[in-house]
Every structure is written in C-alpha cells, then in structure tokens.
Image (cartoon, rainbow, N blue to C red):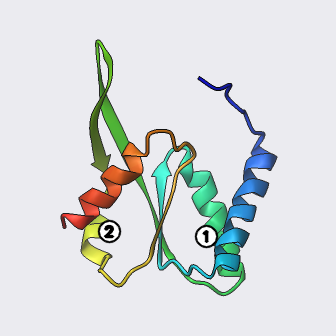
Amino acid sequence: MSDKLYLSAQQLLEDSFELGAQIIRDGFRPTIIIAIWRGGTPMGIAVQELLAWFGIETDHIAIRTSSYRGIDGRSDEIRIHGMNYLIKNCCREDRLLIVDDVFDTGLTIQSVIAYLGDR
C-alpha cells in the first residue's frame, strides 16, 4: 500500500483548476459534470467554474455513493443516490465528466456509468 498524500485546500483548488485547464487543452467539452459527494464536489465546482470562465457552459450535479461494509470489509456493490435529475435530463448525446477525489479500484465510477447506461 502506498503512502497517502494529503493536500491543502489551496493545493486542491490549484490542482482542480489544472484539471480544468487540461480538459480544455484536450478539447473535451462536457455538457454535464457529475461530482461524487463528498470528495469530488470541491474539484467539480472548481472545474465547472473554470470551464464557465472560458465560455464552456455545463450542467452540473453532485451524487452520492455508498458501499456495504460487512465483517470482511467492503463489498463489490456500490449504491448510487441522487440520480433522479440525471435520469430525467441526461441523454445519449450528452458528454459526461465524472469527478471524484480518489480513484483506486474504479468501481465507483464504473457503477455510476453502468447505472446511467441501464436507464
């Protein structure tokens, strides 16, 4: 297991703006930003603000995920909360940007994508 890296609020903001700048440089123009509550929301806000500053308008929402933790640890089942707005307003032509603070197994983002794909 690697050592954890802790960022100050200022460093998180600067890194989030850099992420937004990288998105612009890469030519990706999201129509919806999905920030995963709690950790992904500060970054999602900063990215959305930077994109708006450059005239790239996006819809944006925070969703919450949880996983069942039994005696033997975390399960593979991710529960997703707060998706009603996306289900009602998201269409296949939308370009989604999903923002979270930690990407270890990829299971959370994979679950969000699968959930939307099933709708």
Label 1 secondary element: helix
Residue 112 appears at what percent x and percent y? 34, 55
Rendered view: 64 above or below 89? above
Rendered view: 64 above or below 61? above
Who's the residue at 75% across and 63% down the image? 18
Q: Badge 1: how crowded within 10 Å, few (<14), some, or many (20+)?
A: many
Q: Earlier in the sequence, mark 2 or mark 1?
A: 1
Check disc 1 and give the amino acid type.
Gln
Check disc 2 and give the amino acid type.
Leu
Who's the residue at 55% across and 53% down the image? 41
Q: How far is mark 2 from mark 1, CA to CA?
A: 17 Å
Task: Tell which residue pokes out farthest to the left in this image.
Answer: 118
List the residue tagged with mark 2.
Answer: 86
List the residue tagged with mark 1.
Answer: 48
Who's the residue at 61% across and 62% down the image? 45
Q: Badge 2: how crowded within 10 Å, few (<14), some, or many (20+)?
A: some
Task: Tell which residue pokes out farthest to the front in this image.
Answer: 1
Residue 51 appears at what percent x and percent y? 65, 76
